[in-house]
Image (spheres, rainbow, N blue to C red):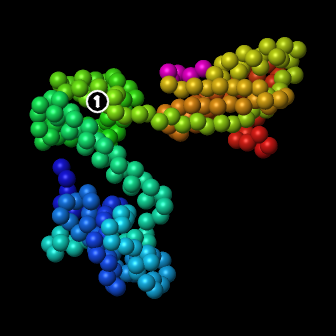
């Protein structure tokens, strides 16, 4: 259920509605009918000579909540205490939540039940399990069996799956590195070939590992995976599989992020 006020330390997305010489008033986009205030001292680091050089009406801003007083309806905000990474993360989170809300509306219409009923019957549990409704849609688009595997049941599941599949695009990432491979065995070429074929294996159906010859003794290795964590794990496993074979047959391997390292 939506909170009435944000928590202290939370990052919020807001819209500037009024700029005064002493600060700016902001509506909280995620908290309907709530407003916050950014004191001029929290607009930017250093001395702010002219506040409108830093913030303007109708501007979207990401702020950090410094203090709340629900009794008085006060929410004190800071603009200067938000770095670029936090700003991008908050905007992405907000966009994802907006999309999840649209998809939930589609689902409720298809099921012919209210949004409130959806929340009571399964959305709250999805958020508890996956962290957010968007992540539930995303994980379902990625793995159509995840809901049943996590113990969810109900007539809503098939519609949820289809909406996730039709509307969520899974983004894949690529990481690359280079291998220096040498073998001093009489059958070294055979063992290197065996090691490279082994390196390209993965337990994941949606992970691709490719090794290509660059020029003796260099090889490139590229991992394509659903996220960077999986990609890095698969890279380590691939290098380890090569090491296991070469170390048993008078060979050696070293890994580098760049070719000239």
Residue 100: x percent and y percent?
29, 41
- Give left or right: position of 217 versus 174: right
Neighbour tally class for label 1: few under 14, some 14-19, many 20 plus, Cα within 10 Å: some
Seen in the picture, residue 162 relative to 97 is either above or below; the reply is above
Q: Is residue 105 above or below residue 65?
A: above
Residue 82 on the magenta span = no
Residue 202, magenta (yes or no): yes
Q: Position of residue 196 (x, y in %)?
A: 71, 21
Q: Quadrant location of residue 184?
A: top right
Where's residue 84, x and y in %? 48, 61
Highlighted range, magenta: 201-205
Label 1 sits on a secondary structure element that is helix
Residue displayed at 65% across by 36% down: 176
Front-lying residue, 5 or 170: 170
Q: Is residue 19 left or right of residue 218?
A: left
Measured along the vertical axis of the image, is residue 185 above or below residue 39?
Answer: above
Write the residue at 64% across / 31% down.
Answer: 222
Identify the residue at image location x=81%, y=24%.
251
Residue 199 in view of the camera? yes
């Amino acid at each position: 259920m939506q909170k009435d006020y944000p928590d202290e330390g939370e990052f919020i997305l807001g819209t500037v509605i009024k700029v005064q010489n002493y600060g700016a008033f902001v509506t909280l986009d995620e908290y309907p009918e709530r407003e916050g205030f950014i004191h001029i001292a929290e607009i930017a680091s250093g001395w702010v000579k002219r506040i409108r050089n830093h913030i303007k009406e109708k501007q979207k801003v990401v702020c950090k909540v410094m203090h709340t007083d629900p009794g008085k309806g006060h929410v004190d905000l800071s603009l200067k205490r938000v770095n670029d990474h936090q700003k991008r993360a908050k905007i992405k989170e907000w966009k994802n939540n907006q999309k999840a809300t649209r998809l939930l509306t589609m689902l409720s219409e298809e099921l012919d039940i209210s949004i409130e009923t959806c929340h009571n019957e399964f959305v709250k549990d999805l958020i508890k399990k996956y962290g957010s409704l968007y992540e539930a849609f995303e994980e379902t688009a990625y793995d159509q069996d995840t809901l049943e595997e996590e113990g969810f049941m109900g007539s809503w599941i098939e519609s949820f799956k289809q909406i996730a599949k039709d509307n969520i695009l899974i983004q894949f990432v690529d990481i690359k590195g280079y291998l220096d491979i040498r073998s001093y065995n009489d059958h070294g070429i055979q063992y290197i070939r065996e090691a490279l074929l082994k390196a390209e294996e993965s337990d994941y159906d949606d992970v691709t590992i490719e090794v290509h010859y660059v020029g003796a003794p260099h090889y490139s290795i590229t991992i394509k995976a659903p996220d960077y964590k999986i990609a890095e794990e698969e890279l380590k496993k691939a290098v380890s599989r090569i090491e296991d074979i070469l170390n048993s047959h008078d060979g050696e391997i070293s890994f580098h992020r760049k070719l000239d390292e």
